[in-house]
């Protein structure tokens, strides 16, 4: 009886192999934001499109749930495991378990702290430093086109203190503008990535002597929500945001596209949650026995007032 | 317009002088710190007192409005101030309410969702949001007063779950609304911001109900010694329940103000960690965490101090990485000054005899 079962299992596995079906386990972090929901939809949708069998789990922002999910993926013998780690430490034992079972792990959007890089095969996600650089580059191009040289006073809305996107988006942006001595950050305060704080900080900026002195006013926000709050603050103070300043945000949420289309904002740099296609490209390469680069950055665009209005319906349909 | 700033400054000084005459008044210490901060800004922060008279709007009616940094402080302090009014009474009965931030999110989510997705009239939206706050308060009151669960645990439940409820109401989206009445609550002016007037109104109403009657005395009795006051005939349970309901109501009002101010219900972030600011305001105001004596106006002064500190950090462009340190130092100083023992060190035993 047992032999028969084993035989049937081998047969079943064999059939699977014949059909060439790939099984992927994805230990999603949770559903804490609209960004994450879009990320989940992309992972699920692309799997269905390619005929890849996806075993999906939602960890509700808890590391122990993610570890449990990976344990069950190992038990089910998936081909590849995808993991966006909720925190960056404490992953070595479970990653080692996966390694011993011969299952490669691809990290998504965040990395882990480990002394042994061989515990995962690759990383896919956003490069926050590049997002900062994209913002800076767009700004420099725009200033050169408008005024002939890159000069101006930047009022920066920083994200939550200590958060990786806030640190890196600042770093990337500063790297670019450091090459232009007439382009400087004159005020930099944290808006906690929220609309309410973004508005409150902007109200203070508007009333500062730096604001009255500034000739070319530039607002750079580490996310679109803070920028949208800041736009409200300007409008309530009787400032025309689109005419009197240059305004840049990061994330490329649909509301930002709408603000750009209405002429209240100028540019938003994408932080792409739709990593599904690139993720499964990596999975298929792995299964085909190809070597993966140690990290793959998601394709991220920059959307400004030339294209945002036309792209708004498309963006709304995404998330 | 600098004159207006100087007038404000002298008003603060009058409070200061009044306080020194009656330094036993607990509101003195937060107001002293506030006066020092305003003095500091007069000398060291450019344009801090630059006030302008502009054309504002009060629910569509054009009215004059003041415009300047001090007005921003009044505007933004009102959220924590309103929360602190409810929180003061809860702490006075020996409790605590950790769910105020989450209740703000629920109220805001209710208002925005009803208005945008169901097209409900503004008055009904506001009523529903306030009702949600009352219901949340009843839930907390039920757990604490009837079921006897420790307040820290009982209100923690709603603090965690409440934000989930708000997310459920908004379906995880940030809901933007444009109804002129709903967007006016947090943005209207009658010379000063309406949220500030709302806070004053609630302060006065609460003060009259608690201090104009025996209610405040009964609350203090329950907070001092629940068993003794029960034996003496005070219905401690009912009183505790009502205090939590009132705190839920205050949270809902604060939620409406905040949601209206940014014209959108951001269930994920509205009121996040504001419960701690509210508790801080109450503590700065001199109400003891163990319950008993409570000081409403003093709590509101505490809220003003917290916001004045935050705004000063923005104005001085203190790096957000280090900004919490000077804030903590000022608050620490106020708390230390309230301690009888520390004051004795300065005044000497003679002064307090």
Image (tube, coloured by chain):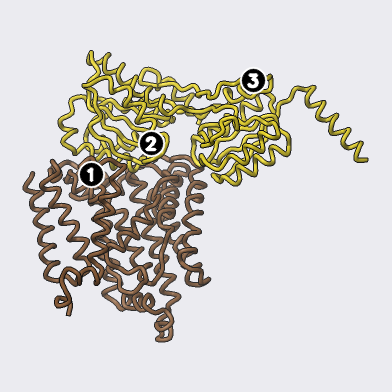
The residue sitting at 30% across, 70% down in the picture is B294
The residue that disc 2 covers is A225
Q: Residue B350 appears at what percent x and percent y?
A: 14, 78
Is residue B58 in view?
A: no
Q: Which chain is brown?
A: B
Question: Does mark 3 fall on the same chain as mark 2?
Answer: yes
Question: Does mark 1 fall on the same chain as mark 3?
Answer: no
Q: CA distance from mark 2 to mark 1?
A: 25 Å
Q: Mark 1, chain letter?
A: B
The answer to whether the residue labelled 2 contacts the one labelled 3, judged by CB atoms less than 8 Å apart, is no
The residue that disc 3 covers is A285
Horizontal side of A276 relative to A74 (left or right) equals: left
Q: CA distance from mark 2 to mark 3?
A: 37 Å
The answer to whether the residue labelled 2 contacts the one labelled 1, judged by CB atoms less than 8 Å apart, is no
- Residue nearest the viewer, comparing B74 with B348: B348
Looking at this view, name the residue that lies furthest to the left: B3
Q: How many residues crowd around disc 1 within 10 Å: few (fewer than 14), some, or many (20 or more)?
A: some
């Amino acid at each position: 009886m047992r032999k028969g079962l084993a035989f049937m299992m081998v047969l079943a596995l064999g059939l699977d192999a014949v059909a060439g079906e790939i099984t992927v386990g994805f230990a999603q972090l949770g559903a804490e934001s609209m960004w994450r929901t879009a990320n989940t939809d992309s992972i699920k949708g692309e799997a269905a499109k390619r005929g890849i069998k996806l075993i999906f789990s939602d960890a509700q922002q808890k590391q122990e749930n993610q570890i449990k999910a990976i344990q069950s993926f190992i038990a089910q013998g998936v081909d590849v495991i995808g993991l966006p780690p909720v925190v960056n430490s404490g992953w070595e034992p479970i990653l080692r378990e996966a390694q011993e079972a011969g299952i490669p792990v691809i990290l998504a959007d965040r990395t882990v702290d480990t002394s042994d890089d061989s515990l995962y095969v690759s990383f896919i996600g956003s490069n926050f430093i590049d997002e900062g650089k994209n913002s800076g580059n767009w700004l420099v191009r725009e200033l050169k086109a408008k005024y002939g040289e890159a000069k101006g006073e930047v009022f920066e809305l920083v994200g939550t203190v200590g958060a990786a996107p806030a640190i890196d988006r600042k770093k990337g942006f500063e790297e670019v503008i450091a090459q232009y001595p007439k382009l400087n950050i004159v005020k930099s305060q944290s808006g906690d990535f929220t609309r309410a704080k973004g508005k409150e900080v902007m109200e203070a900026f508007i009333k500062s002597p730096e604001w009255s002195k500034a000739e070319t006013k530039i607002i750079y926000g580490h996310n679109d929500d803070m920028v949208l709050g800041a736009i409200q603050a300007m409008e309530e103070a009787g400032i025309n945001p689109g005419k009197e300043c240059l305004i840049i945000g990061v994330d490329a949420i649909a509301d930002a596209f709408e603000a750009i289309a209405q002429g209240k904002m100028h540019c938003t740099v994408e932080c792409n949650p739709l990593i599904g296609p690139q993720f499964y490209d990596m999975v298929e390469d792995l299964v085909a026995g190809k070597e993966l680069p140690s990290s793959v950055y998601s394709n991220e665009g920059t959307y400004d007032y030339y294209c945002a209005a036309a792209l708004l319906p498309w963006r709304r349909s995404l998330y | 317009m600098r004159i207006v700033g100087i007038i404000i400054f002298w008003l603060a000084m009058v409070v200061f002088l009044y306080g020194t005459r009656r330094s036993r008044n607990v509101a003195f210490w937060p107001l002293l710190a506030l006066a020092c901060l305003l003095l500091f800004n007069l000398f060291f922060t450019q344009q801090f007192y630059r006030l302008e008279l502009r054309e504002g709007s009060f629910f569509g009616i054009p009215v004059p409005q003041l415009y300047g940094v001090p007005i921003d402080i009044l505007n933004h302090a009102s959220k924590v101030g309103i929360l602190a009014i409810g929180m003061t009474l809860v702490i006075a009965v020996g409790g605590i309410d950790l769910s105020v931030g989450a209740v703000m999110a629920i109220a805001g989510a209710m208002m925005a969702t009803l208005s945008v997705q169901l097209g409900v009239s503004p008055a009904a939206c506001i009523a529903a949001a306030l009702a949600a706050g009352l219901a949340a308060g009843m839930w907390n009151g039920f757990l604490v007063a009837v079921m006897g669960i420790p307040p820290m645990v009982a209100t923690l439940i709603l603090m965690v779950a409440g934000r989930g409820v708000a997310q459920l109401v908004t379906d995880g989206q940030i809901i933007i609304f444009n109804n002129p009445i709903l967007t006016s609550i947090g943005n209207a002016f009658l010379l000063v911001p309406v949220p500030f007037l709302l806070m004053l109104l609630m302060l006065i109403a609460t003060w009259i109900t608690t201090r104009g009657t025996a209610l405040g005395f009964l609350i203090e009795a329950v907070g001092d010694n629940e068993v003794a006051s029960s034996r003496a005939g005070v219905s401690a349970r009912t009183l505790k329940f009502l205090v939590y309901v009132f705190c839920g109501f205050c949270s809902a009002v604060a939620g409406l103000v905040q949601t209206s101010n940014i014209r959108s219900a951001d269930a994920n972030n509205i009121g996040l960690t504001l419960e701690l600011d509210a508790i801080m305001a109450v503590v700065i105001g001199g109400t003891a965490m163990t319950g008993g004596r409570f000081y409403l106006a003093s709590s509101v002064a505490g809220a003003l101090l917290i916001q004045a500190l935050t705004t000063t950090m923005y104005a001085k462009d203190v790096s957000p990485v280090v900004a919490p340190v000077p804030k903590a130092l000022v608050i620490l100083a106020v708390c230390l000054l309230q301690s009888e023992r520390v004051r004795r060190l300065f005044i000497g035993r003679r002064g307090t005899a």
